[in-house]
Amino acid sequence: MSAGGEQLERVSPIAAWRARLLQPFARGEIGHTLARGAFWSVVINVGGYGTSFVVQVVLARSLGHVQYGNYAYALAWMNTALLFGKLELDTCALRFVGMYDGAKKWFLLRGFLGRIDRVLRLTSFGVAAIGAIVVWILSKHLSAGVAASLWAVCALLPASAMLEFKARCLQAFKKVPESQAPSLLLRPVLFGTGVAITTYGFHVPLSAPEAIGINLCAAVAALLLIDRYLRAAIPVEARTVVSSYETRQWLNTAVSFLIIAGAQLVLGTQTDVVVVGSLLGASEAGLYQVASQLASLITFGITAIIYVALAMISDLHARRRREELQQLVTLVSRASLVISVLGVTLLAVLGPKILGWFGPTFPAAYPVLLVLSSASFVAATVGILAGFLLTLTEHQRKAATVVVGSAVLNLMLSLAATRKFGAIGTASATAATTFLRSAVLAVYCSRLLGIRIVPWARLGDRH
């Protein structure tokens, strides 16, 4: 064997392992492209979820049941306000940055990045300021711990908005590791380290506002790194041309995305936490938050794969390659089914034990965990992919109608069910609307696109 061959053999075990791992999904051009791009996305997401899980365990034990409830409740409100702080301009970046970069419209690319960055700074700081004023007005009706926590997340909001925007820009430039690593790996590592040092190193009792402050420091560090990555990713041609703007088109598109995102927020578990915290108290919100985070284990794998598949969906639809689009959907469906079954089984068997890691009171959330796991299973295998298919293939109005309708239904059911049945009622309302929404979106995909979202569809099936 030649020296070059010996060197290749010495450095190839990781590449060979990766090829064996992804081989079932790598048949043909579509499968190979998906597998190659998804590998690092899955690796980073697995590492990020594992890190975040450990951080949440450390945080829950450091704060205690009541303070962790305050933390979860305040963070749920911040995630709700974040929608208006970023106005879905991060989602617009995924569309327009990728489009301008591919078409080499450097003047529009520079204009978008510069102007939207400034708009986002204005909106995020504006929403944070308004939030702080609202908390001050309502502070007499809030406990001291809750009010202080809400003020703290007002400071966290702008950094979170900018972090998400820059990550989407990097995703549009097809820089998968760079777009995910700062927020999914660096931020939780720094946050968890700060919490652990404060609690176990200096033996200082940690409160919810202080934990949010540590989270803010971690977010700023991640933002500085991702900003450096983004500056390096911008093509040289786009750095010197005169900027051009299509501001009206950008904002009109953002409004459409904002409507869908607002409805999805109502359908998400963050709104559930707000409902539970408002009606049942911050302590119950903390229990619900942990159950929802564990249930999200079922969807994180498919989210990592879809992260890579988004650009492929738009491209195949634009070129009218329906057979290849069906092939892509089938491959993603098969991967999501495998991951989801493993996740549901793990949580059903080990749920009480895993909840116990957070503290002695958290196993009480096991029934909520089971209900939310069923909702996550349906979303992972059908709902998420169906929604993206419609949104990225010029059927966003149909998707918006379904999502908005199910959001209104979910909010009404959640408020009624929470009052009558407690947190299990909240989870049941979310599960019911998730089933309904996923089924309707799948039917639309079949009728409008001729695409079946099932893992057993033949590759290249003409339906």
Image (tube, rainbow, N blue to C red):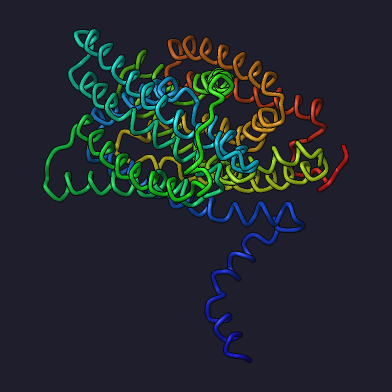
Q: Residue at x 48, y 9 (%)?
A: 416
- The quadrant of the rendering that contains the N terminus is bottom right
User: Which residue corresponds to the image point at 57% horizontal and 48% vertical from the top-left?
Assistant: 342
- Does 276 appear above or below 14? above
Q: Position of residue 424 (x, y in %)?
A: 47, 22
Extreme residue toward the bottom, this view? 1
- Which of 452/456 is in front? 452
Residue 35, x across and y down, in percent: 64, 55
Query: Total label count?
Result: 0
Return the residue found at the far right.
462
Is 186 above or below relative to 368?
below
Above or below, 91 relative to 187 = above
Along the line of sight, which residue is nearer the eye, 319 or 363? 319
Would you say 230 lies left or right of 455 here?
A: left
The answer to which quarter of the image holds residue 310 is top right
Q: Which residue is drawn at the image coordinates 27% and 27% (left, top)?
A: 155
Decide: is 415 above or below 323.
above
**Does residue 7 appear to the left or right of 282 in the view shown?**
right
Residue 429 visible in the displayed image: no
- Residue 6 point in image, percent of width and height: 57, 86
Quarter residue 294 falls in: top left
Asked if one can make out residue 387 in the rendered structure from this viewpoint, the answer is yes
Q: Quadrant of residue 209?
A: top left
User: Along the horizontal axis of the image, is 459 left or right of 432?
Assistant: right
Residue 254: x, y in percent?
Answer: 54, 22
Front position in the image: 420 or 405: 405
